[in-house]
Amino acid sequence: MGSLFGLVGWCILFVLCWPLALLTLVVWPIVWVLLLPLRLIGIAVDAVFAFLRTVLFLPARLLGYREPGEKDTSA
């Protein structure tokens, strides 16, 4: 759905100002490549936080903590 909006937006831009639309086609891949490292950093930070959450909640899992309202199925 996002690609469709992007295509329609680019077509409207092409009708209104074709030089800017062509410049967008040239510049967009360069911007995408420049933003890849930031996306990788975000994925790495998310993984670190998930690991910390797992380590911090490990004692509760080992002691058998259950969420309120969760039924006991160990019978």
Image (cartoon, rainbow, N blue to C red):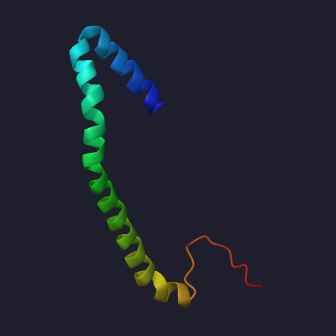
Residue 39 in the image: state x and y as whole percent: 32, 54
Which residue is nearer to you in this view: 15 or 42? 15
**Above or below: residue 40 compared with residue 60:** above
Residue at coordinates 73% horizontally, 84% vertically from top-left? 74
Which residue is nearer to you in this view: 1 or 13? 13
**38 relative position to 72: left or right:** left
Residue 71 in the image: state x and y as whole percent: 68, 74
The C terminus sits in image quarter:
bottom right
Which residue is nearer to you in this view: 2 or 30? 30
Name of the residue lying farthest toward the top: 15
User: Which quadrant holds residue 22?
Assistant: top left
User: Which quadrant holds residue 2?
Assistant: top left
**Above or below: residue 59 compared with residue 67:** below
- In this figure, what is the number of numbered marks? 0
Residue 23 in the image: state x and y as whole percent: 23, 24
**74 relative position to 61: left or right:** right
